[in-house]
Image (spheres, rainbow, N blue to C red):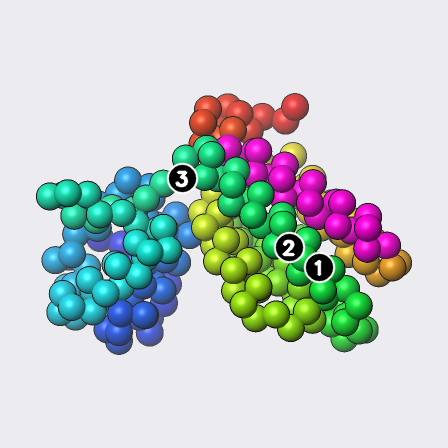
Amino acid sequence: MRTFRFDNPLAERRGSAQLIADALREAIIQGQLTAGEPLRQEQLASHFSVSRIPLREALRCLESEGWIEFLPNRGARVSGLSASEGREIYEIRASLERTALELAFPLHNEQTWRDTETALQAALKEKQRPRYVHRNREFHLALYRPAQRPHLLGLIDSLHKRGERYLRLKLEMPFHKRKSDDEHEQIVKACRRGDLDTAIRILTAHLLETGCLLADYLQRGPQSLAPR
């Protein structure tokens, strides 16, 4: 395994299993660790200055979340997504986020709408891949946060992160990013004029289409991302 740099200096100074898991998860999301890459426990333990015990705990946590997998007699490696898994993530997201928006809609006020629009504008303007995936997730969560359903938002957040390592590809596909950004704006505009049905319709189609896009990419490769 190559030597790599994490953006979380706290995780490099402290060796708790949770901080190690957070750092490795973020490295996968940002593409610093890619699907199929081996995770050498000896090198990781040295990198984080910890014993094998908290490291193994961190790896088991990531395994339970689907980020890594253990192979018999070969150790751990970063797991990938199959085309069907990629599509399913967005199908589940579509269901959960529809419910979240329905719950949040009547509880939004002027301040929460300003917060949502601020998150939207930040995502629209962001050009750096690592920051874009964060801005995109923050927009979606700001849209649902007034629902006050922490478990529901936790599930949505977890699914967002599972797909984020591929979401950064949108910055390399201007056509798809523009379409995605336009749909985000349409969702907010529909909500602001009180048209929840239209907002839900756009949101659902937006997520399901992204799932199909991701499935095509995982099945056929980058050529599937050409505008059509």
Q: Which residue position holds label 3?
A: 81
Residue 134, percent from left and from top:
53, 58
Side of 107 relative to 180 (left or right): right
Q: Which residue position holds label 1?
A: 101
Side of 61 relative to 189 (left or right): left
Q: Amino acid at mark 1?
A: Leu
Q: Can residue 132 be spotted in the picture? A: yes
Cα–Cα span, label 1 and label 2: 6 Å
In front of the other: label 2 or label 3? Answer: 2
The residues colored magenta run 195-215
Cα–Cα span, label 2 and label 3: 21 Å
Q: Earlier in the sequence, mark 1 or mark 3?
A: 3
Cα–Cα span, label 1 and label 3: 27 Å
Question: Which residue is at the front of the view, 139 or 101?
Answer: 101
Few, some or many residues within 10 Å of mark 2 (<14, 14–19, 20+): many
Residue 1, percent from left and from top:
19, 47
Q: Residue at x 47, y 34 (%)?
A: 84
Q: Are marks 2 and 3 in contact (CB under 8 Å)?
A: no
Residue 224, percent from left and from top:
53, 25
> Is 209 colored magenta in this rendering?
yes
Q: Can residue 171 be spotted in the picture? A: no
Q: Are marks 1 and 2 in contact (CB under 8 Å)?
A: yes
Task: Determine which of the numbered discs, if any, sits on residue 97 in the image.
Answer: 2
> Is 152 colored magenta in this rendering?
no
Q: Residue furthest right?
A: 193
Where does the C terminus fall, quadrant-wise?
Answer: top right
Q: Amino acid at mark 3?
A: Leu
- Secondary structure mostly seen in magenta is helix
